[in-house]
Image (cartoon, helix red, strand yellow):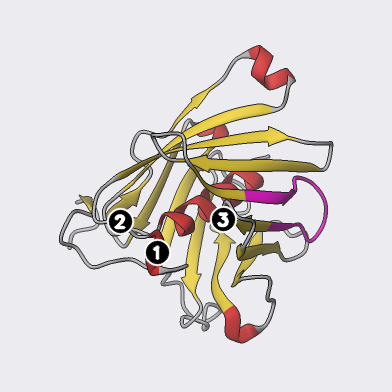
Amino acid sequence: MPKNKKTEWQVGDPTISIVGDQFCNPYPMDLMVKRKVQSFSKDNYQVFDPSGNLLLQIDGQAWGINRKRVMTDPAGFTILTMRQKGMTLKNKWEVHGGESKEREDLLFTVHQSLAVSLKTSVDVFLAENNNVKKSNTCDFHASGGYSNISFKVFKSDALIAGVGVTHKFTWGSFCKGKCNFRVRVNPEVDYAFIIALLVMVDDNEN
């Protein structure tokens, strides 16, 4: 496929299940993500469907070395844990299923593409693609974030999520540490995976 020709993941395309099949739907999903700062070092993300039903929550550190974020379902069950690996020019995160940090429970790693860039850009390597040091071929690529008023995720040249992400910003919400995102997830794409990427890209920018 030519690199300059972008396609979009559609109904009938293979399912992209990274976190779990239960997070994949056969239709596009429009999600509202609300971020609220709880303290100087902690903030919280909540993910809602168009009917206002809570789907996911993400808690953790907004600042610091070796940050950790935990994604849970509405009942408080831990779905995955995101851990930033040290402080380097190119941020790296490891994402494990549940609360684990064991290698066999690794789902994927996220590497910042460039140390210095006007736009946050990250490469995603699935756990089975563990030879990332010898290969530059990532499984997914994501770019965007708060300051860019956009967030897009690609599998090769196919857009799988992020069409029409917007931020509702007012000075009042800024002073209260609040920010809202609207995310479009394409059919058969794992929305828990997309939300985890959004949180890490947003963290990198902040």
Q: Earlier in the sequence, mark 1 or mark 3?
A: 1
**Residue 60 appears at what percent x and percent y?**
74, 51
Residue that appears at 52% across and 77% down: 132
User: For residue 22, which numbered disc appears in the image?
Assistant: 1
Residue 44 is covered by the magenta coloring: no
Three-letter residue code for mark 3 = Asp
Q: CA distance from mark 2 to mark 1?
A: 8 Å
User: For residue 25, which numbered disc appears in the image?
Assistant: 2
**Residue 88 appears at what percent x and percent y?**
74, 60
Residue found farthest to the top: 171
What is the magenta range? 58-69
Q: Is residue 65 left or right of residue 31?
A: right
Dot 3: within a 10 Å radius of its alpha carbon, few (fewer than 14), some, or many (20 or more) residues? some
Q: Nearer the viewer, residue 23 or 51?
A: 51
Three-letter residue code for mark 1 = Gln
Residue 86 drawn above or below residue 119: below
Quadrant housing residue 137:
bottom left
Name the residue carrying label 3. 73
**Residue 168 appears at what percent x and percent y?**
52, 22
Q: Nearer the viewer, residue 47 or 66?
A: 47
Q: In which quadrant is the N terminus drawn? A: bottom left
